[in-house]
Image (cartoon, grey):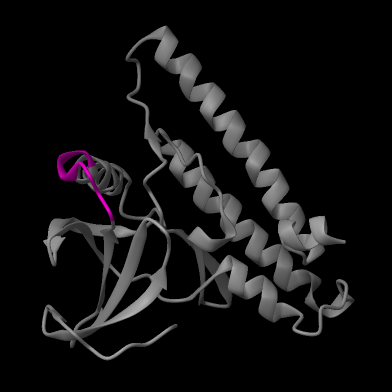
Amino acid sequence: MQSVSPFSIIDGGAVHVSRRQSKSIIYRSKTSTHDVGLKVLLNTTDPDHARQILSHEHDVSLHLPAGCSSRQVIGVTDFHGNPALKFIWANGITLKEWMQNVHQDGSSLQRGDFPVRVRAAMAIAKTLADFHDAGVAYNSLNPGDIVLSQAAGNYVATFVDLSGASIFKRYESDSTAAEEVRAKEVDLRSLGKLLYQVIDGKLQEEAEDE
């Protein structure tokens, strides 16, 4: 995590930059009870539209059941004049970081770590299945947006970016049901590609460079 000098306070904790992108910055603040995050949208020419985007993430978070491993959104707020999403921080490391760390020497898959990769793959598949069972298509399986943590010897995969997810209400219409099936099929194809990378031990961009 890239740290900078604290310049503000969230819930009594000093704020540090955790992740910087072209359109947003993720801040992290340690408090006495739990870590809090802020996703701040940058360069927004239409603040109302930006808040709608963040409110959608909040709606998805509220729709998903308690047992589903997803970002727990607290609400939409403002941070230094920019629309922001406040959430409980998901502890762990991103799948992208995890894959880079499993074999720091860049070697090919070895026999000893195959079960580790399988457990990680199963955790990712379980979280996607939980989303689908709740009537939500994720639409954006990205190694940088999946956080892996360990619990009772197994992995837990938390999907942290909910901005691209779609909620499908049951029995709304035949056309909506068809859209839900198509969206979930896209998720499953993306899952297959992602799990291949997990088992193979190489990120897609690394494979393309060879």
Residue located at (64% from left, 42% from top): 190
Which quadrant: the N terminus?
A: bottom left
- Per the image, is 60 magenta? no
Residue 98 image position (x, y, % from top left): 62, 74
Q: Is residue 13 above or below residue 26?
A: below
Q: Which residues are magenta?
A: 43-49
In the image, taking residue 170 as reference, residue 200 lies left or right, namely: right
Q: How many marks?
A: 0
Which quadrant: the C terminus?
A: bottom right
Residue 145 vs residue 122, the one in the foreground? 145
Locate residue 203: give its quadrant: bottom right
Locate residue 74: give its quadrant: bottom left
Q: Is residue 195 above or below residue 118?
A: above
Residue 35 vs residue 124, the one in the foreground? 35
Residue located at (64% from left, 45% from top): 191
Residue located at (35% from left, 16% from top): 171
Q: Is residue 36 above or below residue 210?
A: below
Q: Is residue 118 above or below residue 175?
A: below
Residue 65 image position (x, y, % from top left): 32, 48
Q: Residue furthest bottom?
A: 5
Residue 118 image position (x, y, % from top left): 72, 63
Residue 4 image position (x, y, % from top left): 33, 88
Residue located at (77% from left, 67% from top): 201
In the image, taking residue 69 as reference, residue 98 lies left or right, namely: right
